[in-house]
Image (cartoon, grey):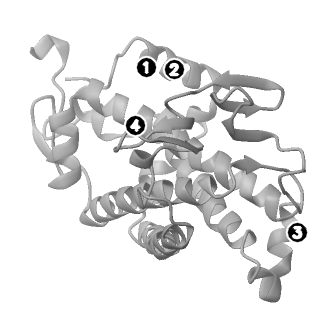
Amino acid sequence: MSQGVSEDAPKGGDLVKRHRLSTRIWHWTNAVALLVMLMSGLMIFNAHPRLYWGEYGANADHAWLEIGASRQGQGMLRIGPAVVETTGVLGVWTDREGEVKHRAFPWWSTIPSAYSLADARLWHLAFAWVLALGLLIYLVWSLVNRHLRRDLHITRDEWRLSHILHDVKEHARLRFPTGAAALRYNVLQKFAYAFVLFAALPLMIVTGLAMSPGTDAWASVVTHAFGGRQSARSVHFIFAFALVGFFVVHIVMVVLAGPLNEVRSMITGKYRLPREKSDV
């Protein structure tokens, strides 16, 4: 036992409480809301599969990103001058009946699966309210119970480059905290959660408002702040896929750290502390 550590402190192998009920509810509500919004958003994107910078954007204007079909009939993704063939995945693909479709995202990735811009907008806006209200309630409650201060606050020592690089190396070597240390977020987790809570999700909500023509009637400054609706749409799309990237990394880390233990902690709140190597 190291000096200053209580004999009653949790140790490797102990079953302890890890996540509060409010955190667990928000986690799963947010997961469902983001999944529905992503899939309905892809259907909305299918209506005009191009992204622009500025106020306006139409077929004749130069798009910085485009998903569609080439003149040769192949699926393609173009970002700036770079073009990647995506036949069978994006742009040109085969539906469940074996019919070839020329549309950006395939049926299995969208809500609804059959093309309907009106239905996709209904799904998207309904769950946007779930996302926005859920985020607001979670942040307020996290301030009240001091979750943000206690668990997500980045200390002065953690801002040191040497500390950050050490955590990067430990993750690259798949060395995860054990014992009571596993209950604390490391600096990379804090950066990731801060990005999601205070950058990605708020920007998704604000750019969603900026794309609405109705916003001009009561808060035109929101649209102007992004340089126009098309710029807001581009930022919205970029941060949507930044959240997808966060989700992929999150799932990989859960699998590597022990999926049953990690998922149980987010359902029941109980977590089995990883044992120290000397205890195994």
Asked whether 100 or 194 is in front, the reply is 100
Asked whether 255 or 123 is in front, the reply is 123
Residue 81, percent across and down? 83, 26
Marks 4 & 1, CB-CB < 8 Å contact: no
Residue 26, percent across and down? 35, 64
Q: Which residue is mark 2?
A: 168
Label number found at residue 81: none
Check disc 3 and give the amino acid type. Answer: His
In this rendering, does residue 209 appear at all? yes
Other-residue count near label 1 (Cα within 10 Å), few / some / many at <14 / 14–19 / ≥20: some
Check disc 2 and give the amino acid type. Answer: Val
Q: Residue furthest bottom?
A: 218
Give the Cα distance between marks 3 and 2.
38 Å
Q: Which residue is mark 1?
A: 171
Check disc 4 and give the amino acid type. Answer: His
Please give left or right for residue 210 compared with residue 115 in the image: right
Marks 1 & 2, CB-CB < 8 Å contact: yes
Please give left or right for residue 104 compared with residue 120 in the image: right
Dot 2 falls on a residue whose secondary structure is helix
Q: How many marks?
A: 4
Give the Cα distance between marks 4 and 3.
34 Å
Dot 1 falls on a residue whose secondary structure is helix
Q: Which residue is mark 3?
A: 224
Marks 4 & 2, CB-CB < 8 Å contact: no
Marks 4 & 3, CB-CB < 8 Å contact: no
Q: Nearer the viewer, mark 3 or mark 2?
A: 3
Give the Cα distance between marks 4 and 1.
13 Å
Other-residue count near label 2 (Cα within 10 Å), few / some / many at <14 / 14–19 / ≥20: some
Q: Which residue is mark 4?
A: 250
